[in-house]
Amino acid sequence: MKRLTLILSGTAIVLVVFFGGWVLMYPSPDPKNIKYVLWKADLYKLNPDAATGTMVGDRTREKLVIGKTKAQLRDKFGSILSPQDVSPYLRACYQNSSWKDKDVLFLGRSPWMVVFDGDQATNLVLIKGC
């Protein structure tokens, strides 16, 4: 019984050190941040603004969007907005882009635009510097 207690205590210490180190090494908004990693795996509810901000540095961000339906994106990101519902800057960028005749939605109030073919996302575009 003493040995089991020692093993469990040792395991708990290792886990605390591991996750504590992870949190300290990768603070938010790093894409390796524990909260963002858990959010990507649908194990943590992250603020959508924080998630879309962190996506800028995430090399695998397309996997979060491409192939998803509008309903799935709404579930993941909270809200998806039409070009008419976003800021004048984002709307102008969209209207002056090669995507102006495509079905697009924005991930919340972020500069991430999702291009759709039917109900499936086919492209993820970061709108900046237009």
Image (tube, rainbow, N blue to C red):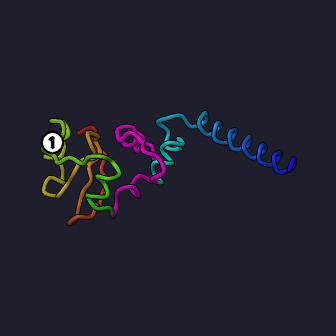
Q: The C terminus lies in which quarter of the figure?
A: top left
Whether the magenta-drawn stretch holds residue 66 is answered as: yes
Residue type at mark 1 is Asp
Which residue shows up at 20% across the image and 40% down it?
Answer: 90
Q: Is residue 47 above or below residue 67?
A: above
Q: Is residue 90 above or below residue 3?
A: above
Which residue shows up at 25% across the image and 58% down it?
Answer: 70
- Relative to 38, 100 lies left or right: left
Question: Where does the image place residue 129, in percent across and percent down from the top left?
Answer: 27, 37
- Residue bearing the label numbered 1: 85
Most foreground residue, 16 or 102: 16
Which residue shows up at 61% across the image and 36% down it?
Answer: 25
Question: Where does the image place residue 86, in percent across and percent down from the top left?
Answer: 18, 40
Whether the magenta-drawn stretch holds residue 40 is answered as: no
- Relative to 69, 96 lies left or right: left
Residue placed farthest to the bottom in the image? 118
Most foreground residue, 107 or 97: 107
Please indicate, yes or no, whether residue 96 appears anywhere in the rendered image.
no
Question: Where does the image place residue 52, in percent across and percent down from the top left?
Answer: 36, 42
Question: Where does the image place residue 18, in percent across and percent down from the top left?
Answer: 68, 42
Q: Is residue 53 above or below residue 114?
A: above
**Residue 64 appears in which quarter of the rendering?**
bottom left
Residue placed farthest to the right in the image? 2
Element under disc 1: helix
Q: Is residue 122 above or below residue 21?
A: below
Q: Point out the stretch of residues depicted in magenta.
A: 42-67
